[in-house]
Image (cartoon, rainbow, N blue to C red):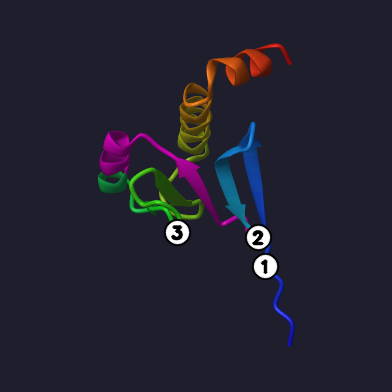
């Protein structure tokens, strides 16, 4: 029996900010550590990142209480966190695209 698992990884200049599992039922998003704590308390569907650094990543179960708009906001937050951590040169390269 062969089991094939896959996921989609979205990156900015080699730094991932979004991982989507093969069933699209769960995503991993980078998050500010302080914000992560509040989100995990507020939503049943948000918990420490599965197979990720638990301090900097959250997993979101899309079928639970995380709305599409909340997921979009968290995706934007993740993207902004990764961009802010890039070197000045890489940010300039990204802005020139």
Q: Is residue 25 found inside the magenta-colored segment of the image?
A: yes
N-terminal-most mark, 1 or 3: 1
Q: In the rendering, which numbered label is found on residue 50?
A: 3
- 79 or 39: nearer the eye? 79
N-terminal-most mark, 3 or 2: 2
SS of the residue under disc 3: loop
Q: Nearer the viewer, mark 3 or mark 2?
A: 3
**Which residues are the magenta region?**
22-39
N-terminal-most mark, 2 or 1: 1
Where is residue 68? Give x, y as percent.
52, 39
Asked if disc 2 and disc 1 are in contact, CB closer than 8 Å, the reply is yes
Q: Nearer the viewer, mark 2 or mark 1?
A: 1
Where is residue 15? Give x, y as percent.
57, 37
As drawn, is 85 to the left or to the right of 33? right
Asked if disc 1 and disc 3 are in contact, CB closer than 8 Å, the reply is no
SS of the residue under disc 1: loop
With respect to residue 26, does 30 lie above or below?
above
As drawn, is 41 to the left or to the right of 47? left
Q: Which residue is mark 1?
A: 5
Residue drawn at x 64%, y 47% as measured from the top left: 9
């Amino acid at each position: 029996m062969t089991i094939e698992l896959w996921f989609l990884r979205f990156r900015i200049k080699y730094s991932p900010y979004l991982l989507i599992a093969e069933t699209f039922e769960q995503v991993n998003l980078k998050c500010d550590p302080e914000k992560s704590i509040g989100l995990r308390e507020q939503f049943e569907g948000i918990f420490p990142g599965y197979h990720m650094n638990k301090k900097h990543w959250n997993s979101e179960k899309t079928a639970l209480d995380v709305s599409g708009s909340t997921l979009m906001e968290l995706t934007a937050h993740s993207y902004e966190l990764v961009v802010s951590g890039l070197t000045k040169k890489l940010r300039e390269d990204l802005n020139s695209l």
